[in-house]
Image (cartoon, grey):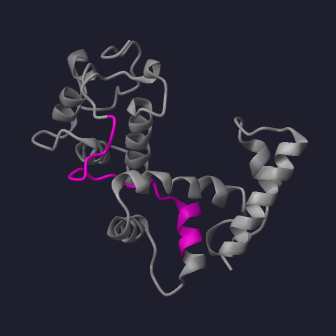
Amino acid sequence: MAGKVVNSSFVLLRCTDSQCLNSMHHFIEKIYPDGPLNYNGLFRGMQMQSGWGKKTAALFTKSVYHAHNEHYSEMLRFWDDIPATISVIDSFFLPVDAVIIAIFNRLDKTRNWNFDSINRTLKSQYTNEQIEAWDDLWFWGFITQNGSGQQRAFEWNKNKYWIMIESDKNPDTIKKVRKKAEEFLSMLI
């Protein structure tokens, strides 16, 4: 299956010939000509697409990385020419959204947190591989926030846990996740 894209949803991209879907390098060359042929190039190229912002481009790049790194089945891979690890000269971005911004605001209200400031802060202290692990903040923030904007309450939100299709609905599991969520919340105080 590697190297083959059967049904593509990239219709809106400037990728007009199917050849560009068969390889990471060809894909990046189409969406970001003269850009680096790595995860940073993929992020930058996706960000330039109509309707794609930084968060969505970072989320797409993270998903491509997940499909190709050694932590997941080889059957998920669709490009043969993509690195399984993120090079130190590459650049990887955390897909920052309102949930993650709210966490950073809770930890430090003196800064104006956004996609760029959060990624700059993480890049100054962590490797690309370590930044990818920070995406777990979204899950823990999602199930521990209630409301929106600046008016979010930080509390266990069972309803948000339940709406996630992939969440385990076993009562024992929910108790364990709630306990971990409460531990997470205690770190934000």
Residue sitting at the far bottom: 110
Span shown in magenta: 84-104
Q: Is residue 3 above or below residue 123?
A: above
Name the quarter where the C terminus is drawn: bottom right
Residue 123 horizontal/vertical position (percent): 34, 65
Q: Is residue 94 above or below residue 63?
A: below
Q: How many marks?
A: 0
Residue at 88 percent of width and 44 percent of height? 172
Residue at 36 percent of width and 21 percent of height? 78
The image quarter containing residue 11 is: top left
Depth check: give the residue in front, 43 or 130: 130
Residue 48 horizontal/vertical position (percent): 27, 46
Residue 160 horizontal/vertical position (percent): 75, 51
Name the quarter where the N terminus is drawn: top left
Dominant SS of magenta comes to loop
Residue at 18 percent of width and 32 percent of height? 30
Residue 120 horizontal/vertical position (percent): 34, 69
Residue at 41 percent of width and 64 percent of height? 115
Depth check: give the residue in front, 174 or 16: 174
Q: Is residue 184 left or right of residue 118?
A: right
